[in-house]
Each structure stands twice: as C-alpha cells, then as structure tokens.
Image (cartoon, rainbow, N blue to C red):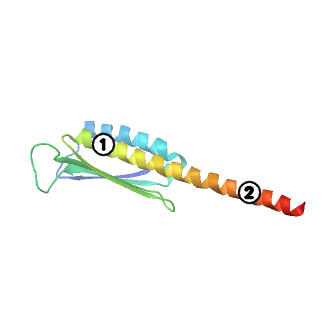
Amino acid sequence: MVLMDTRIKTTGYEMTPETSEYLASRLAHVEKLLGDDALTARCEVELGRDAGGQRHGEYVWFAEMQIIAPGSYRIRATNHSASINGAIDDVKEEVERQLKRERKLHIRIARTGGAFAKRLMRFGRAAEE
C-alpha cells in the first residue's frame, strides 16, 4: 500500500493492470526507504514509448521518476530499456541509490556536527581549569 502522493503519466502507452501492479510493488520499495518522509513526499512517474529517434528495436521504453520531499530534497531518474518493466526496475534502482546517498549525507553532517560540539565542550572545560 503506497501512502505517498503518487502521480502516474503515460506517454504513447496504455497502462495494463499487470504493469500497474508491478509499478506499485516497486514504489513500495522506494516508499520504505523514504520512511517518515513518505507521508509528505510526492512521487511523479512517467512511463511510455520514446518519441524521439528510434521507434523500434532496443531501448524504446522509458521510465522517469521524480521524488519531491518538501523542504529537503528532490530526486530525479530517467532510464530507457527494451521493456517497460525493465525501465521501471532500472529507474527504481537509481532512485534507491540516490535516496541512500542522501541519507548517508544527512547522517555524516549530524555526526560531524556532534563531534564539533563535543570539541567545543572540551575546549570550554580546559579554559575553566
């Protein structure tokens, strides 16, 4: 069950129920990574056939996903593949990679801030003695 605001757009493609279920299962993984931000985040997904250049052969399906969390970050990924499900998988993996990187960045900033505060407290005690 997806709790975040999800908007799906299709371009040159009629979404089937199977694809809709597949996309919902992939969005559930992304939502799990968002944690508490999932309630306020908006996820915009666009699926379809590529309009430019090659209209047959490999890599004609595309998926684009954009996650917007108010006040914090905006993540965007686009991918082309030979099948619509492959494009969904690839874009989900890229979004997950970016979300994990964003989380590590926040943890690192919190840790360095805490270490700085600890150094300041040590310096304050040394000045009192």
The amino acid marked with disc number 2 is Arg
Q: Residue at x 42, y 49 (%)?
A: 98
The amino acid marked with disc number 1 is Asp
Q: Residue at x 49, y 61 (%)?
A: 70
Toward which corner of the image does residue 85 lie, by quadrant? top left
The residue that mark 1 highlights is 90
Judge from the rendering whether residue 118 lies leftward or rightward of residue 74; answer left or right.
Answer: right
| In this view, 88 is above or below 72 | above
Q: Tags 2 and 1 in contact by the CB under 8 Å rule?
A: no
Percent x, y of residue 55? 10, 50
Percent x, y of residue 24? 36, 41
Judge from the rendering whether residue 24 lies leftward or rightward of residue 125; answer left or right.
Answer: left
Judge from the rendering whether residue 6 lies leftward or rightward of residue 32; answer left or right.
Answer: left
The residue that mark 2 highlights is 119
Percent x, y of residue 127? 85, 63
Crowd class of label 1 (few under 14; some 14 to 19; many from 20; radius 10 Å): many
